[in-house]
Image (cartoon, helix red, strand yellow):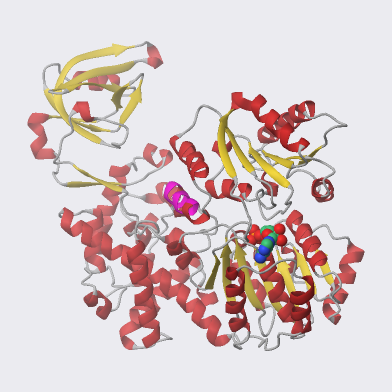
Amino acid sequence: MITYSFAEQAIEYLKGVGPKRAELLKKELNIYTFGDLLTYFPFRYIDKSKFHNIKEINNDLVYVQIKGKITSIETIGKLRATRLVATLQDATGTIELVWFQGVKWMKDKLKVGEEYVVFGKPNLFNYSYNITHPDVELLSENTASIVTGLYPFYYSSEKLKSLGFNSKGISNITKTLITSAKGSIYETLPDDIIQRYKLISREEAILNIHFPANPDILQKAITRIKFEELFYLQLKLLMMKQVRLNKSQGHRFTIVGDYFNTFFKENLPFELTNAQKKVIKEIRVDIGSGKQMNRLLQGDVGSGKTLVALMTMLIALDNNYQASMMVPTEILANQHYETISRMLSGLDINVQLLTGSTKTKKRREIDEGLQNGTIHILIGTHALIEDTVVFKNLGLVIIDEQHRFGVAQRAKLWEKNEIPPHILVMTATPIPRTLAMTLYGDLDYSVIDELPPGRKPVKTYHYYDNDRLKIFNFMKQQVKAGRQVYVVYPLINESETLDLKDLMDGYDSITREFPLPEFAVSIVHGQMKAVDKDFEMLRFIKKETQIMVSTTVIEVGVDVPNASVMVIENAERFGLSQLHQLRGRVGRGADQSYCILISTHKLTSDGKKRIETMVRTSDGFEIAEVDLKLRGPGDMEGTQQSGLVDLKLANIVKDEKMIKLARDTAIDVLGDDPLLDKEKNKRLINQLKLMTKVKGSWEKIS
Ligand code: ADP
Ligand code: MG
């Protein structure tokens, strides 16, 4: 039986590792312990019993194994630039093999006319493929030395490779470890689950993932590990939810009173959409239940989430509670503050704004108003969750554009209060259902799947750099017709001076093309002071300027219905969800709107795919699916805190069915044994504890 202590052994104590390489294994591959190495899995397998034809070699093949005759060997270049080039020929063609190091030694080893087995990574060079530093063996000696069958490949870093830990080196230490680990790899799943799904044991799975006996058992091993990963992820999420529901009572909002009703009758400028009505109903059930609401509201850009938030806040007020709304940027905080104050005009409701740039005096007034209850609604940035902000009786927190707020931050909000406020998280970054199930697996979930009526879909076009004059003319036409235009530049990293220079150059050429007094141009970027940003933004909102040149600071949430053109420079540098968000800034009024994506001619295949997708569809969920496929879940915003990054084999896109199975299984297990204290679930508790000892998040669950 084992033995957690084995899995927890520090990696430097493994034979063949030592302190120096251990340091790198930790730093570069996150391998700290024996257990980490056991679950550092190969990223692919090569079937070394098969040979490729030289003619078939292409970009998709990461490694090839070919068999052929060497027809020439040449040393090219002088001194340090010397390289050895050998030509290998099979029945279908020829390929060059190249060595930059060990030239002399290889030259002695290789013989023209002999047949070899060559293994390596093909590179495209001058329109044809070559292989640098391949593994080479005489065909006649090959049968004995090369293991036929599946050969594992591990990612390694350049530094590790230089210390001998290339894929093969990692495989070697893994072999050492596995040999000594036999019998010590403990089971993590309860027997009944293993039997129900006919899973192989964890030990057998780990052995076979590293050293597959045959393709069949490799598949079984992968299935077993994937299930385990997804099952534990879901188990953790569901336990968080269970704890929240059990432990935390919630305020019971039973009254729908004057604030809500007066607003509904007198202030509401339009009919609610059916989707908005449906969601408000779902929310009312939650907040009337006596349990804390923790609901995620997804709705595409422009679907009218702000209104749902506002009406929910009014219910809180009707029940004598305060409400607050937290947003990711100051611009957005300002805008929500303006919009909400305007919509509530005539009602006796005190709305205040708190951001990082609120002056001390004002800040003191707000603190006082919050504590004595004279402030009803507080809108702000994350300044809101600072410990110094104390409410008299906070009943509801709205978090807008949630993907910028982590699970931990959410937790902080409700830890501050004896009875936690209800939480409504809103996001316009649509995510596929399976991902939602995981990313927000501890939340309840609502969708607004309908846009307010009368919206014309935004027309989207792709142009190249050299079409800029045409685009300027189009912008002029639109501005003369009374519309406003956004021009957005990428600023991947707000401190990159190069990006800022692009933006300033763009701004210069636009002010030249659109001169005062006929035109006025605003500019907003991340290195401006908040007051200056707001000033410029406000000029645009008030239509004092017709063009807004900016970085992605306007990406989230900003609402200027008169703006009808979104021009995106270097569109290929933006991610899909960002492009979708940006496009969502237009098409909010009655006018036909346009989104113009400008790119260089040099597009990567991903860049091209992103732009094509934008031109083809405006369905946020479809865009999210493509995005997820292109980027993989690791890069999606919000995945860092979600536990998704702990998945080594499971894939949130490809393993949709298994995610459902894992979630259903976890629901079963917890339904039968909510606290996991039955004997048969002992392994679950032990494993959860071990996982948390490493990652430190168990406290939040228990
Ligand atoms: P998002 O969901 O992206 O946050 P907003 O709440 O900013 O969207 O709403 C977008 C625009 O649609 C706003 O100008 C808002 O006033 C308007 N709107 C919201 N609900 C409706 C509705 N039921 N009918 C018409 N317009 C609406
Ligand atoms: Mg919004």
Q: Residue at x 32, y 32 (%)?
A: 59
Q: Is residue 492 left or right of residue 146?
A: right
Q: Is residue 420 above or below residue 199?
A: below
Q: Position of residue 103 (x, y in %)?
A: 29, 20
Give the farthest residue toward the front: 454
Q: Quick check: which quadrant has ligand 1?
A: bottom right
Front residue of 183/675: it is 675
Which contiguous range is marked in magenta?
Answer: 623-630
Q: Main secondary structure of the magenta part?
A: helix
Q: Is residue 533 above or below residue 660?
A: above
Q: Position of residue 100 (x, y in %)?
A: 34, 22
Q: Does the magenta run of residues contain 180?
A: no
Q: Is residue 482 above or below residue 313?
A: above
Q: Residue at x 29, y 47 (%)?
A: 44
Viewport quadrant of the N terminus: bottom left
Q: Does the magenta run of residues contain 627?
A: yes
Front residue of 523/259: it is 259
Q: Is residue 166 left or right of residue 65?
A: right
Q: Toward which corner of the image does residue 105 lie, by quadrant?
A: top left
